[in-house]
Amino acid sequence: MPEKKRTTIILFSGEYDKAMAAYIIANGAAAYDHEVTIFHTFWGLNALRKDNQVPLKKGFMEKMFGKMMPRGADKMGLSKMNYLGMGPKMIKQVMKKHNAMPLPDLISMAQEQDVKLLACTMTMDLLGLQKEELLDNIEYGGVGAYVGDSEDANITLFI
Amino acid sequence: MPEKKRTTIILFSGEYDKAMAAYIIANGAAAYDHEVTIFHTFWGLNALRKDNQVPLKKGFMEKMFGKMMPRGADKMGLSKMNYLGMGPKMIKQVMKKHNAMPLPDLISMAQEQDVKLLACTMTMDLLGLQKEELLDNIEYGGVGAYVGDSEDANITLFI
Amino acid sequence: MPEKKRTTIILFSGEYDKAMAAYIIANGAAAYDHEVTIFHTFWGLNALRKDNQVPLKKGFMEKMFGKMMPRGADKMGLSKMNYLGMGPKMIKQVMKKHNAMPLPDLISMAQEQDVKLLACTMTMDLLGLQKEELLDNIEYGGVGAYVGDSEDANITLFI
């Protein structure tokens, strides 16, 4: 039996459109029967945040980062034409009109297709993000976990 | 006979310097006899727009996007040091001095070297871009076409 | 004896956090015994600049670029939350607290692990950067050198 194809994506960016691209590619590759990993690091971790505030003990800097960063996929801005938040509204309106899936639905779909959602523990630590604040049913690891999943991959991307 | 090497590039970004990097790598890989695909999605589609306005029937949002986005490769800004358009002028001046190819020429060269220029139909739909507005002799497809070209690729990049 | 695994990274971006990500992945892959190349092009060249000014004869444009771009890894800004330089200070403070390596140390570590640091001669030429301004013990090449190192690579990334 031939080995399964693999796709791994590093999601570094914290923008709505880039995260959308990452999840559309991930879902597409999974539909073509690839094993897929998305490694969420730095600002990309924000796509995995729950949208409600989780009461946790944090230091001053960690609280600051927590407040300054978007809480969850739906709150992220655009990489282009952000225009004080008008861009994301336009994009979401246009997506609705064309029946395109919004980002939170793309993430649920990825979970249903067994895409491995990996959160980078090193940057969680730096930015003061704790497991309780992130979505359920995701995995945790560092750069070693990423390299392990990627070294036999067919498609490797950094977004 | 050994199989040909393959390089596939997703051009997501709409900036002059990033598109230049994409096309320089594509032309370089083609010169080393790779089969090369550039999949233009989101803001990267703007590199494929014709520079003249094409009269077409469009909805309000599609017209807005059409106006707000740069019309063709030569109109794109820089990802860094844009300075109200001064950056792109400086870069183009410096490129001229050093006999470096401007972006539109890099795109023509890619077409001459049989680099496959693929436009993402899903984002064309979202942004209201129609085939008449894009360069001639390009191909159209979705994430499936990208995955198909990429799964045996040697180099896969997201720009 | 099986061939060594390979990872190649194009560092195009000139931001502290993106360069950090590039060097963390490079050091991680090297620790897992990959041969690693980082190809520094466009703004990514700034990570290789020495932090002191090197007196050199330059044209007007080259002098301008030299002044406008950050001189070395430690001077680079963030891709997010830059806030007039407050972001980088916060990140560096948080990194210190968590004993994370600052970027200049990550670069030294990469050199100790024999990661090949490649500077793109074409963009050096465009931006007017000369060898005397860049770190010692790095290599020089164009897109051909990048393609050569990458075509048998397991992981290829554009950052």
Image: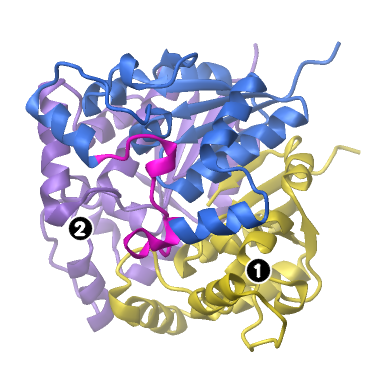
Chain colours: A yellow, B purple, C blue
- Mark 2 vs mark 1: same chain? no
Name which residue lies at 69% across and 61% down.
A125
Query: How many numbered circles are shown?
Result: 2
Name which residue lies at 68% across and 63% down.
A124
Residue A45 badge:
none
Q: Quadrant of the C terminus of chain B?
A: top left
> According to the image, label 2 marks what residue?
B70
Disc 1 element: loop
> According to the image, label 1 marks what residue?
A128
Compared with A128, B14 (above or below) is above
Residue A50 locus on image (x, y percent): 66, 81
Asked if the residue at tag 1 contacts the one at tag 2, i.e. Cβ–Cβ closer than 8 Å, the answer is no
A98 relative position to A134: left or right: left
Residue C153 locus on image (x, y percent): 64, 26
Q: Nearer the viewer, residue A126 or A87?
A: A126
Compared with A91, C104 (above or below) is above
Name which residue lies at 20% across and 24% down.
B100
| Distance of label 2 from label 1 (alpha carbons) | 39 Å
The three-letter code of the residue at mark 2 reads: Pro
The three-letter code of the residue at mark 1 reads: Gly
Disc 2 element: loop
B62 relative position to B118: left or right: left
Q: Nearer the viewer, residue A8 or B94?
A: B94
Task: Give, as a single range, the part of the protein colored magenta.
Answer: C69-88
Nearer the camera: disc 2 or disc 1: 1
Q: Is residue C35 magenta?
A: no
